[in-house]
Amino acid sequence: MKKFYIAIMVGILLVLGACSADKENSSNHGSVDDGETATNNGAIDHGVDDKQVGFNMSGGMIEEAAGVPTAEKERILEAFSIYIDAFNEKDIDKYMGTLSKHSEVFDLEEEREYMEEQFEEYDLNREAADITIVQYSEQEAQVFAKLKTKIKQISSGLEFDQLGRQVTVFTKDDGNWKVSSIHYIGDEKK
């Protein structure tokens, strides 16, 4: 009888040992990772690389870029103001005029269609605060702002506010500062 129990125990140990061996090569069938593709984009940062934009997505200290010529600073901040105003005024042509023709992020036709739909479906108003040029070169400027967006769905009357932080990247198009990309993250409600 003892030999029988010993044989069963050895068999169980062998099965357990085989199951735990070589975990790195297992296919994780039945695990929470089934069907998941590994990416470099996190759920929190939405794939935004902090090293490419002029602020830390975790809300760290915002520092103004050094060496921005006064005239360029005024032109960049004016371009940002026009971008925000066009959005608030629902002026699609003015809004589209703020976007870079050379952007690698925006498809201008798709952006026009999308924004026309948004302007028809919602009353939108953005208030920008703490507007700061956080990176600057002769061909690119990054403008940080805290945004409060008031959104009202026209059909239902449903209203809500959205708070977030945004870096708007401007590049020079024919000597004018135009929006080439936007990096936004919403703030959690406290």
Image (spheres, rainbow, N blue to C red):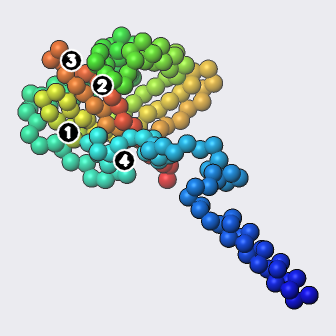
Relative to 176, does residue 181 appear above or below in the rendering? below
- The residue under label 1 is 135
3D distance between C-alphas at marks 3 and 4: 28 Å
Q: Residues within 10 Å of mark 3 (few under 14, many from 20)?
A: some
**Figure quadrant of residue 109:** top left
What label does residue 173 carry, if any? 3
Residue type at mark 4? Met
Relative to 25, does residue 142 appear above or below in the rendering? above
Please tell me which of labels 3 and 1 falls first in the chain.
1
Horizontally, residue 118 falls left or right of residue 141, namely right
At which x and y percent is residue 178? Answer: 25, 21
- The residue under label 2 is 180
Quick one: 45 or 16, which is closer to the camera?
16
Q: Is residue 120 visible?
A: yes
Circle 1 sits in a helix, a strand or a loop, which is it? strand
Residue type at mark 1? Gln
3D distance between C-alphas at marks 4 and 2: 19 Å
- Seen at 74% across and 69% down, the residue is 15
At which x and y percent is residue 132? Answer: 23, 39
Quick check: marks 2 and 1 in contact, CB under 8 Å? no
Quick check: marks 4 and 2 in contact, CB under 8 Å? no
At which x and y percent is residue 87? Answer: 38, 22
Please tell me which of labels 4 and 1 falls first in the chain.
4
- Seen at 38% across and 15% down, the residue is 108
Please tell me which of labels 2 and 1 falls first in the chain.
1
Q: Is residue 90 visible?
A: no
Relative to 39, does residue 172 appear above or below in the rendering? above
- Seen at 42% across and 41% down, the residue is 47
- The residue under label 4 is 57
